[in-house]
Image: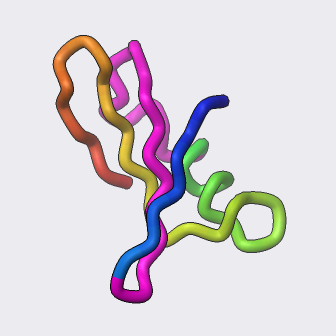
């Protein structure tokens, strides 16, 4: 999985480019990514739909 991790003002977000519509489909995946033990310890995930450049936050 390709992703980027950004940190600013004490918050960390993972940005994930995606080709599919991320609405609702990624909630469980976002929880796993944000997990401090098994994931990358982030406060949230931003899915960027590549085709439309729309953001979906979880």
Q: Nearer the viewer, residue 27 or 56?
A: 56
As rendered, which of 58 and 16 lies closer to the eye? 16
Q: Is residue 43 above or below residue 39?
A: below
Q: Is residue 48 above or below residue 36?
A: above
Residue for point 44% across, 53% down = 45
- What residue is drawn where x is 45% and y is 62%? 6
Write the residue at 60% across / 43% down: 29
Residue 39: x and y in percent read: 73, 58
Residue 49 at x, y percent in the picture: 30, 24
Of the 4 image quadrants, the one containing the N terminus is: top right
Query: Which contiguous range is marked in magenta?
Result: 9-28
42 lies left or right of 50: right
Query: How many numbered circles does the render carry?
Result: 0
Q: Is residue 45 above or below residue 35?
A: above
Asked whether 16 falls inside the magenta stretch, the response is: yes
Q: Residue at x 38, y 54 (%)?
A: 58
Q: Position of residue 38 (x, y in %)?
A: 82, 61
In the figure, is residue 54 to the left or right of 36? left
9 up-or-down from 35: above or below = below
Q: Is residue 36 left or right of residue 50?
A: right
Where does residue 19 sit, x and y in percent of width and height? 40, 14
Magenta stretch containing residue 11, yes or no? yes
Here the colouring is: rainbow
Q: Residue furthest bottom?
A: 10
């Amino acid at each position: 999985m390709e992703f980027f991790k950004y940190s600013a003002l004490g918050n960390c977000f993972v940005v994930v480019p995606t080709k599919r519509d991320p609405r609702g489909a990624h909630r469980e995946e976002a929880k796993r990514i944000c997990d401090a033990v098994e994931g990358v310890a982030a406060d949230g995930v931003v899915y960027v739909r590549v085709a439309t450049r729309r953001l979906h936050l979880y």
